[in-house]
Image: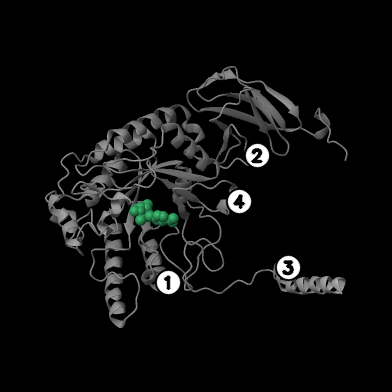
Amino acid sequence: MKKLLIAGLGLAALMSLQPLMAQQTSPKEKINLMHGSHRAGKRMDAAMEKWRGYGLGQFIHWGLYAIPGGEWNGKPYNGAAEWIRSWNGIPNSTYDSLIYKFNPTAFDATSWAKSAKQMGAKYVTFTTKHHDGFCMWPSKYSKYTVANSPYKKDIVKAVVDAYDKEGIDVILYFSVMDWSHPDWRYDLKTKEDSIAFERFKKFTRNQLIELLTNYPKAKGLWFDGTWDKSWVKQAAFADELETEMRKLRPGLIIGSRFRADENGKRHFDSNGVLMGDYEQGWERKIPNTIEDVHGNDWDCVMTVPENQWGYNKAWNGHIKTTNELLEMTAKCVSLGGNFVLNFGPQGDGAIRNEELTLAKQIGDWMKVNQAAIYNCGYAAYDKQDWGYFTKKNDSDQIYMLVFNVPVSGALRVKTPGKTTISKAYLLANAQETFLPEEISSNEYFLHLKKKDHQQPFVIVLETANKQDNNGTKYEKAKI
Ligand code: JFZ
């Protein structure tokens, strides 16, 4: 009886497995989508090739929220400083009247750009309009802009021009969600909501076309605030608008956080294909393996404190150090992405000293080691505990970015396929060479002479192809 029961259960389990097995063996049906991804695989044009090679970027969150700087009437706001308008501790109208206080006398776009250049940033993403709706450019379509603040001048123009002059590409951040616009809705529940949102869609289109027209030097748009149901339901509109923007500005770079497909799928469409030019979901997190990025381009945006983008006076919690940020940069590049570090300038327009110091220290390291970051990507070498491998795009040059020196002083390297190490030397000083000790086929130790390193360092590997297998010292074990 017991046996029978078990046998019966087994059969039931087997039967229940069957549909699953069938699903696994037959190729997944591709859903026909009107507003899904328009491209499979990476964009290979010059603009995107350049983006791919940036390695390191800067993000800037600056707007009215920088004036309260994370506190109101002496009370700290517990969320991210740029979200303070959403706090019930402040009436919206009181927050919005910060426009009359916006007069950043210490703002100097050139000094920002010089600091970014010193850091080694190749691109900057700048908040033209965050969720509060305040426009950092004199938009024709809103009264809530710099033009109506005591400062009056166009901040987006100043930023675009200053960074462009330093050779740093500019991407415009734009929040679709707009808390101050009367027609913004989180969801469309009534006919009135839909009518209001139609107006909001026109307004959004107008502002985006205005930005692209006013600032033709900008290389791309970084969208945010696109997660609410109201916007997710606009697959056709957003698709059409994206096409229009791309037509207006060939080469324009738009990430995966702009639009949803007709089933409401964001970032990846219903077939799992990336929407937009790169994956924009790596927000304060970094992938661990190359599988995590599914063959797509991507960048990671990171705050210095835990989760503060706009200026926060309190600057609480763990503040990331230069070495941590360099390690994140190395990790991102080693997995084919860019690392983008956020800065939150003060209400008066100056960048806080802590951030200026980080920029300088990162830059000091970059000056010596930038070859391992710019135009580099995934090396396809086994990850080792001492750090990260990167590979120069379009060349065989391999870099070892060392963050953890083992007590043995021996850095393990496994080379792929028929690759051998022909030369290894310090990027900072080519005279300092390392004789690779071959410990097994395709496996080496590089012995460090010095073990007390205060800073991460880079070793350049020059590689060669093994002539043939007969020449190698090691034979595969016969098992
Ligand atoms: C958004 C904003 O709300 C925030 O203020 C900041 O501008 C940041 C860069 O972007 O916050 C997000 C957006 C996406 C995720 C998390 C926070 N996400 O995908 O996990």
Tell me whether the residue at label 1 lies in contact with that at label 4, contact meaning CB atoms closer than 8 angstroms: no
**Image coordinates for residue 145, horizontal then vertical, percent:** 19, 57
**In 3D space, how far apart are the residues under numbered discs 3 and 1 (Cα atoms)?**
32 Å
Q: Residues within 10 Å of mark 1 (few under 14, many from 20)?
A: many
* Label 4 environment density (alpha carbons within 10 Å; few <14, some 14–19, many ≥20): few
Relative to 284, is 63 on the left or the right? left
Q: Nearer the viewer, residue 166 or 97?
A: 97
Does label 2 or label 4 sit earlier along the sequence?
4
Disc 4 or 3, which lies upstream in sequence?
3
Label 2 to label 1, Cα distance in Å? 41 Å
Inspect the image, locate mark 3, and give the three-letter code of the amino acid beneath it. Thr
Residue 282 numbered tag: none
Left or right: 141 in relation to 56: left
Question: Which residue has dot 3 on it?
Answer: 25
Marked residue nearer the N-terminal end (2 or 3): 3
Q: Nearer the viewer, mark 1 or mark 4?
A: 4
Give residue 382's mark.
2
Q: Circle 1 is placed at which residue position?
A: 235
Labelled pair 4, 3 in contact (Cβ < 8 Å): no
Label 2, label 4: how far apart the Cα atoms are: 13 Å
Residue 308 position, x and y percent, is 34, 47
Q: Mark 2: which secondary structure?
A: loop
The structure residue drawn at horizontal position 23% and vertical position 46%, both measured from the top left corner, is 158
**Residue sitting farthest toward the front:** 1
CB of mark 4 near ligand 1 (< 8 Å): no
